[in-house]
């Protein structure tokens, strides 16, 4: 049980760092509460696995500190930190039985066989592995093996943090649902701090209370799934989260207002600073409506995606996508659209202007 | 799906078939032919049935050569496998050390076998050879041309020098194919270095090690050139291995019938040991 704090963390895989691009992580600051469920979300190569390995102690960061319960653990190894980590690909000990696989981390810590037995059986029950306990682990299917990996991580009930590094990559889609809800259920039951790394927004948003979005080695936003959706603080969060992602159009800021190709766009932004190299207006497809007047637009294409329809329209400022409800009528040819003022944001050099 | 049947494709197999026939089937059948007959040259043969086989199987000479052969193979496997795995474990995984180590390791494998024998012969000569002279000046009574123990020691040492690299290279390839996550998971599970070797590295190397054992068994069991050049089978008959004995019988004494029978017995022993070993190793895979 532990609170996790990362302070001014930077990491580079090079021995000598000369420029900013030598770093895969730059100035990471995180405060995670004890017992929370957190997700690290970002595309491949954004540094999330590196960050996870730093938290678990497999890597020592180039700069900065890792604290567990305000105690500096930066130089400690994974065993001393007392954490569990589950990897992307199932790691099993081929020559051992399923039972011995689950018991292995406990035996290495010198627990008595009776204690081990009760813990192994409990975790096997939870992961539905009881019937295969005496089988050789190497004979199982990929998801069976990943369950063992999960089990080896979860069997130690005293760990500070449990970390998951895209653990469901190799699992069949229908089993993903099962295992994901199992994990969620497990979190509610054992109340350990859990950190879940993924590039899949659905996984992150369903698992975590707090999602940390990473982009090119930096944290661009931390928040609840709803916050990330309703108020992206960075254009990357805007288009990475949501399907389809946020509409981002180049615009000008004139007289404290957003000016999109000569059209005034209303927003709740108060512009204290206006000297940016690049300014954009961002609005999610969910918050645009067709209307009698507003921004003139031309409907290009309508895509039916089940419950919703995605409408591609061309405005003076560029192409945008609109998510339209089934009951709404979609005009053809020329039309007008309005942006919901509450969810219209301006971005200066990719960061939100507030 | 309908497949059109076209028997003409068999023509493509003919070249391979002819090649295999000429370099394997025909010579082997010639040996089989010799093994049941007696010949005094001029293509005159008389039928002898299984006489040569019985003679070889009951011959003292064959038994002792076979015994020496098994002992030799057993000793070199016992040394080369652990040593090869050990070296592979200590080799660097990245950086400039990798090509350096790989080249160093491949060197002994590239030297022709008779050169290896000649090299070691000179190297081990008690008076002038570096090894022989050094051992003697250190106070050891070493002479591989006179003393049985020394002859065996030198032959084994030569084979270890020549062939351990093969085990190293195979083990190294096996070790490099292990995903880093295995080591990380083991670290988190609190495994000791021995556990990592016992439960991760060794099981993951199983296939390459099976291959290494098979290759080393076959090669060492059929060893000829190196000991022949090094000791010539001596002192006495103490380093006469099966191949050396076979060549003596076939070309030295020109006993083609018994030599042919011995070849076949030899061949079946190699085949049988390989078959048993392979099946034992692969028993778990099938499950």
Image (spheres, coloured by chain):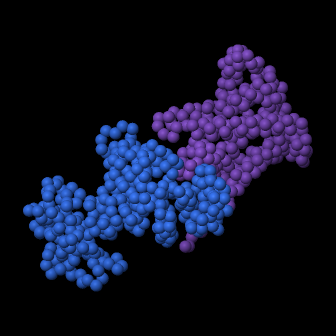
Chain colours: A blue, B purple
Residue that protrudes farthest toward the left in the picture: A255
Q: Quadrant of residue B109?
A: top right
Q: Residue at x 27, y 74 (%)?
A: A286
Q: Quadrant of residue B38?
A: top right
State the count of labels.
Answer: 0
Query: Is A335 placed left or right of A154 in the picture?
Result: left
Residue that protrudes farthest toward the front in the picture: A70
Q: Quadrant of residue B88?
A: top right
Residue A127 placed where, x, y %?
56, 66
Image quadrant containing the C terminus of chain B: bottom right
Q: Nearer the viewer, residue A177 or B213?
A: A177
Residue B194 placed where, x, y %?
62, 44
Q: Is residue B183 visible?
A: no
Q: Nearer the viewer, residue A348 or A297?
A: A348
Q: Is residue B159 visible?
A: yes
Query: Is B150 placed left or right of B20 in the picture?
Result: right
Query: Is A125 placed left or right of A287 in the picture?
Result: right
Q: Residue at x 81, y 35 (%)?
A: B68
Q: Nearer the viewer, residue B35 or B22?
A: B35
Q: Residue at x 82, y 29 (%)?
A: B238
Q: Residue at x 85, y 35 (%)?
A: B64
Query: Is A90 placed left or right of A4 in the picture?
Result: right
Residue B58 placed where, x, y %?
91, 41
Image quadrant containing the N terminus of chain B: bottom right
- Please, is residue A180 above or below residue B42 in the view? below
Residue B259 placed where, x, y %?
83, 39
């Amino acid at each position: 049980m532990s609170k996790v704090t990362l302070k001014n963390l930077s990491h580079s895989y090079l021995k000598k760092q000369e420029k900013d691009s030598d770093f895969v992580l730059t100035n990471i600051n995180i405060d995670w509460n004890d017992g929370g469920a957190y997700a690290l979300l970002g595309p491949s190569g954004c540094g999330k696995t590196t960050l996870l390995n730093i938290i678990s102690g497999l890597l020592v960061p180039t700069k900065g500190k890792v604290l567990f319960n305000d105690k500096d653990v930066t130089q400690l190894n994974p065993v001393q930190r007392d954490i569990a980590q589950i990897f992307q690909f199932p790691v099993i000990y081929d020559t051992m039985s399923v039972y011995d696989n689950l018991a292995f981390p406990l035996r290495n810590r010198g627990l008595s066989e009776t204690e081990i037995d009760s813990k192994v059986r409990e975790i096997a029950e939870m992961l539905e592995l009881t019937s295969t306990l005496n089988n050789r682990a190497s004979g199982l299917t990929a998801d069976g093996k990943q369950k063992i990996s999960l089990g080896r991580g979860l069997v130690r009930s005293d760990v500070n943090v449990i970390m998951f590094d895209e653990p469901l990559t190799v699992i069949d889609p229908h089993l993903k649902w099962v295992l994901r809800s199992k994990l969620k259920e497990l979190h509610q039951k054992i109340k350990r701090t859990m950190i879940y790394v993924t590039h899949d927004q659905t996984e992150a948003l369903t698992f975590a209370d707090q999602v940390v979005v990473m982009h090119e080695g930096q944290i661009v936003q931390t928040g609840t799934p709803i916050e990330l959706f309703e108020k992206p603080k960075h254009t990357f969060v805007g288009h990475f989260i949501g399907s389809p992602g946020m509409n981002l159009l180049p615009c000008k800021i004139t007289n404290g207002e957003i000016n999109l190709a000569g059209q005034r766009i209303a927003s709740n932004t108060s512009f204290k600073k206006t000297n940016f190299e690049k300014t954009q207006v961002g609005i999610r497809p969910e918050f645009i409506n067709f209307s009698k007047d507003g921004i003139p637009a031309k409907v290009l294409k309508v895509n039916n995606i089940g419950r919703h329809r995605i409408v591609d329209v061309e405005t003076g400022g560029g192409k945008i996508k609109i998510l339209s409800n089934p009951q709404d009528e979609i005009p053809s040819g020329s039309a007008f659209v309005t942006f919901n003022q509450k969810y219209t944001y301006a971005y200066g050099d990719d960061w939100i202007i507030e | 799906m309908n497949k059109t049947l076209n028997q003409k494709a068999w023509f493509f197999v003919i070249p391979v078939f002819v090649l295999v026939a000429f370099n394997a089937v025909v010579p082997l059948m010639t040996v089989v032919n010799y093994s049941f007959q007696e010949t005094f040259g001029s293509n005159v043969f008389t039928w002898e049935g299984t006489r040569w086989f019985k003679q070889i199987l009951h011959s003292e000479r064959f038994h002792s050569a076979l015994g020496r052969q098994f002992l030799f193979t057993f000793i070199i496997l016992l040394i080369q496998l652990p040593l090869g795995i050990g070296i592979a474990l200590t080799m660097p995984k990245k950086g400039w050390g990798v090509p350096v180590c790989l080249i160093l390791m491949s060197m002994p494998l590239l030297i022709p076998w008779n050169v290896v024998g000649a090299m070691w012969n000179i190297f081990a000569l008690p008076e002038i050879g570096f090894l022989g002279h050094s051992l003697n000046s250190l106070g050891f009574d070493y002479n591989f041309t006179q003393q049985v123990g020394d002859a065996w020691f030198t032959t084994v040492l030569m084979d270890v020098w020549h062939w351990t690299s093969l085990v190293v290279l195979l083990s190294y390839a096996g070790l490099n194919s292990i995903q880093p996550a295995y080591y990380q998971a083991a670290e988190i599970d609190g495994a000791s270095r021995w556990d990592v070797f016992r439960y991760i590295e060794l099981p993951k190397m199983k296939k390459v090690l099976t291959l290494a054992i098979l290759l080393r068994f076959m090669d060492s069991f059929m060893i000829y050139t190196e000991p022949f050049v090094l000791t010539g089978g001596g002192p006495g008959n103490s380093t006469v291995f099966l191949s050396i004995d076979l060549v003596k019988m076939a070309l030295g004494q020109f006993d083609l019938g018994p030599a042919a029978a011995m070849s076949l017995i030899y061949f079946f022993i190699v085949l049988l040991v390989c078959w048993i070993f392979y099946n034992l190793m692969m028993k778990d895979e099938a499950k």
